Image (spheres, rainbow, N blue to C red):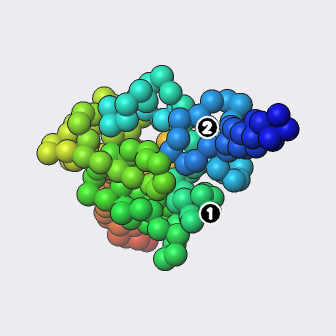
Amino acid sequence: HHRTTMKLFILAVLCFSHALAAEYGAVCSDTEKCGTDTDQKCGKLAYPTTLVTDAATNKYCQCADSKAVNADKKCVECDATNKCGDEECVNSMCQCKDSKAFKIATDKFTCAAATNAEDCGVKKEAFEVKDGKCACKTPDTHEMKWDKANIGWKCEEKSKSGSAATSIGIFALLAVPIADLF
């Protein structure tokens, strides 16, 4: 009889400790702590990606700000040792290689071929998908940049610095002879 109680106790402890910390990428609930640190949060994926089943209904343990998951399941800025799974580390943050879409996985930062614009980023209307790659609908004026906070892509307006610099240059050249007239 004593033995059974012990078994139940151990079982309860195991279940309890498991309930307290869910692994990176695991489905979680608000009462759960994700991983071993505060950088990991339990939340909806930034956009209802079709790459993850039940992404719209479930919450997942994820790192904030495109961080990498290290061996201790902690979220850290990526570098030579703390890699982004098979993806790339740019400016200490993980981002998808080859214009793929972010897809959370059980143990590392993971991306996959996009199936539709919804997979690419928060503003799905800005994207189109060609051969599994995300692209901005208006590539002449917009370029894809990594959206660190939402862990996905965003289409940013290309800077028009070139044309502005030219007009300032011309103005400066003209200003000198005009100034001499006075």
In the rendered structure, which amino acid carries the disc numbered 1? Asp
Q: Residue at x 77, y 36 (%)?
A: 4
Where residue 34 sits: x, y (%)?
A: 65, 44
Q: Residues within 10 Å of mark 1 (few under 14, many from 20)?
A: few
Choose top left, top right, bottom left or bottom right for residue 114: top left
Where residue 173 sits: x, y (%)?
A: 35, 69
Which residue is disc 2 drawn over? 42
Q: Nearer the viewer, residue 143 or 180?
A: 143
Secondary structure beneath label 1: loop
Where residue 47 sits: x, y (%)?
A: 43, 32
Q: Nearer the viewer, residue 19 or 146?
A: 19
In the displayed structure, 166 sits above or below 9; it is below
On the question of residue 28 being in view, the answer is yes
In the rendered structure, which amino acid carries the disc numbered 2? Cys
- Per the rendering, the mark at residue 72 is 1
Q: Residue at x 33, y 45 (%)?
A: 101
Q: CA distance from mark 1 to mark 2?
A: 18 Å
Where residue 172 sits: x, y (%)?
A: 39, 67
